[in-house]
Structure formats: structure tokens, C-alpha cells
Image: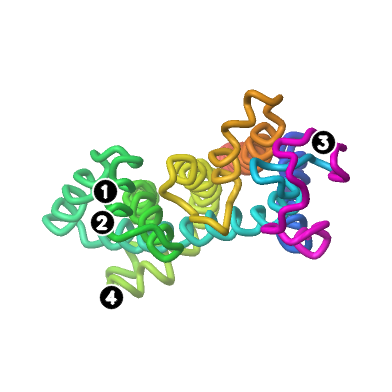
């Protein structure tokens, strides 16, 4: 009888709770926003939480910080998910194909991948965005391009490991095409490590997008993600810093939640592998 899979650790469950809360805020938060995110409520900038009839205070223009935070939540998570999906799909396809093709094809593909990885991510994003201009499609493609080579490395390693199994060798002996082997044999058996990699890439995308917005290369006004909220309220440091601390904490809790869940998922997968080896 197959052993029952142990539940996630307490830290993993905490990560799930954090992610569910962030997901709910992103979906329904804008419907509960006190005001329009662009509406100027008062001429008092950087009001503290509870002042001027606000729950979390105001930003540098006197706009309600809670409303801008709620609207920025959906934008932050959607952008991070979109960029990760683009990079993940491209990276998995390239990594899998290189692993199965092998030989000179593998070498040429991964020499190019190594060249892309050698560029610092922020510098690469700076060059692309300055050249093409900052827009949501450009941001998605740029961060996706930065993510793809790193995903390709992991995907290649996973595919090469699975490719040594007997069922893959049997598929090759039957004369199946590369794409058939990748889709029917390798992909279904690589879901766990790739799911963990997707989570790590998602956390990285949140931080990279926040950094780009902080540098003025990300989302442009009147839209604002959490990184942009930190940048545009930098002057608030002299007035207590609430308008910076709150969006920064939002970024931090989202990244921590993702990492807690992914780490617990990896630990559970390792326990499953160890149990199978002992049986």
C-alpha cells in the first residue's frame, strides 16, 4: 500500500495563508478601496495612519495610501505572475529541447544562455527599457527574458536526469520524436522540481519589478505597483516613513510567503524521495 504523503510543515501552511491573503486582497481589494487611487483627499501630504480620515495615511500628494495599496496589489501580483510565466515557458522549452537534443545543439544553446546570464539583471533591464520605453508589455518581456535562461538551466538538469530512466530510453528505442518524448515522458515527471522553481522565480520577479519601479523604469504614473509607491514617497522618510514602510512590508510579506511555501514543498519532495529509496 502506498504510504500517505505527510502534510506540509507549519511554515509551509503559514506561507499558504500569506499567499491566500495576498491573493484575496489583489482580487477583491479594489472593490473595498475607500477612494479612487488617483483622488486627492487632502492637502496634507504624508498624513500618519488614522489622520485626515484615512486608515493608513496619505501619500506625497495627499491621496489615500490604502486605496493605492489595494489597487497596486493586483498590479504587482499580476505583473510578477505574467513575467514568470513568460520566462518559465521559454526556459522550460529551451532547457528540455537542449537536454534531449544533446551534442552540438545543447552546447550552442547553452553558450548563448551563459552569455545572457553573464549580464547583471538590472543592467540588462535598464538597456532594454531605455531603448524600447517603459510599458507593461515591455516590462513583461524584459523580466521574462531575464528569467528564462535561469529556468532553462534548471529544466535542462531535470530533463537530463529523467532522460536516463528506462521508460525514456524505451521511448527513444520506439523511435518517438524529441517533442513526443519531452511532452509524454519528461514533462509529467518533472512537475515537482519545476513547480518549486516557478515559485522561486515568482518571488524573484516581485523583487525585480519592485526594484525597476523604484528606479523609475517600471510602472509609470498614474498606475503604481508597490515598488512605485516606495519610490514616489521617498520624501516621506522625514515625516515618519509610514508611506514607505507599508508598501515595503507588503512586498516583503509576499516574498516571504512564496519562499515559505516553496521551501516546504521542496522539503516534502525530498522526504518522498528518501522514503522511496528506503522501500
Q: Which mark is residue 49?
A: 3
The residue beneath circle 4 is 177
Pick whichever of labels 1 and 4 is earlier in the sequence: 1
CA distance for labels 4 and 3: 62 Å
CA distance for labels 2 and 3: 40 Å
**Mark 2 and mark 4 in contact (Cβ < 8 Å)?**
no
Of the two numbered discs 2 and 3 in the rendering, the one whose residue sits closer to the viewer: 3
Pick whichever of labels 4 and 2 is earlier in the sequence: 2
**Could you tell me if residue 3 is visible in this image?**
no
Span shown in magenta: 29-54
Please say if 36 is above or below 3. below
| Of 8 and 32, the residue lying toward us | 32
Label 4: which secondary element: loop
| Residue 90 spot, x, y in % from top left | 36, 62
Residue 91 lies in quadrant: bottom left
Identify the residue shown where x is 88% and y is 45%: 53
Of the two numbered discs 1 and 3 in the rendering, the one whose residue sits closer to the viewer: 3
| Of 169 and 51, the residue lying toward us | 51
Relative to 15, 56 lies left or right: right
Pick whichever of labels 1 and 3 is earlier in the sequence: 3
Specify few, some or many for label 1: CA neighbours under 10 Å numbering under 14, 14-19, or 20 or more.
Answer: few
Of the two numbered discs 1 and 4 in the rendering, the one whose residue sits closer to the viewer: 1
Label 1: which secondary element: helix
The residue beneath circle 1 is 127
Q: Which mark is residue 131?
A: 2
**Mark 3 and mark 1 in contact (Cβ < 8 Å)?**
no
| Residue 193 spot, x, y in % from top left | 50, 49
Identify the residue shown where x is 15% and y is 51%: 107
CA distance for labels 1 and 3: 39 Å
Amino acid at each position: 500500500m502506498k504510504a500517505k504523503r505527510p502534510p506540509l510543515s507549519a511554515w509551509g501552511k503559514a506561507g499558504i495563508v500569506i499567499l491566500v491573503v495576498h491573493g484575496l486582497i489583489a482580487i477583491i481589494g479594489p472593490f473595498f478601496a475607500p477612494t479612487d487611487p488617483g483622488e486627492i483627499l487632502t492637502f496634507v501630504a504624508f498624513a500618519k495612519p488614522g489622520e485626515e480620515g484615512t486608515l493608513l495615511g496619505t501619500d506625497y500628494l495627499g491621496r489615500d495610501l490604502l486605496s493605492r495599496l489595494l489597487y497596486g496589489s493586483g498590479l504587482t501580483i499580476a505583473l510578477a505572475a505574467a513575467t514568470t510565466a513568460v520566462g518559465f515557458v521559454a526556459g522550460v522549452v529551451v532547457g528540455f529541447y537542449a537536454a534531449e537534443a544533446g551534442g552540438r545543439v545543447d552546447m550552442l544553446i547553452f553558450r548563448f544562455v551563459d552569455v545572457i546570464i553573464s549580464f547583471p539583471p538590472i543592467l540588462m533591464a535598464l538597456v532594454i527599457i531605455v531603448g524600447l520605453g517603459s510599458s507593461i508589455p515591455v516590462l513583461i518581456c524584459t523580466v521574462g527574458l531575464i528569467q528564462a535562461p535561469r529556468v532553462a538551466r534548471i529544466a535542462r538538469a531535470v530533463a537530463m536526469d529523467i532522460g536516463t530512466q528506462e521508460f525514456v530510453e524505451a521511448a527513444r528505442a520506439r523511435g518517438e520524436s524529441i517533442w513526443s518524448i519531452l511532452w509524454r515522458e519528461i514533462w509529467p515527471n518533472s512537475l515537482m522540481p519545476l513547480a518549486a522553481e516557478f515559485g522561486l522565480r515568482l518571488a524573484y520577479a516581485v523583487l525585480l519589478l519592485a526594484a525597476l519601479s523604484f528606479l523609475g523604469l517600471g510602472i509609470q504614473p498614474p498606475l503604481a505597483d508597490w515598488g512605485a509607491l516606495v519610490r514616489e514617497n521617498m520624501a516621506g522618510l522625514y515625516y515618519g516613513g509610514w508611506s514607505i514602510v507599508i508598501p515595503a512590508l507588503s512586498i516583503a510579506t509576499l516574498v516571504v510567503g512564496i519562499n515559505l511555501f516553496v521551501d516546504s514543498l521542496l522539503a516534502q519532495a525530498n522526504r518522498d524521495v528518501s522514503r522511496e529509496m528506503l522501500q
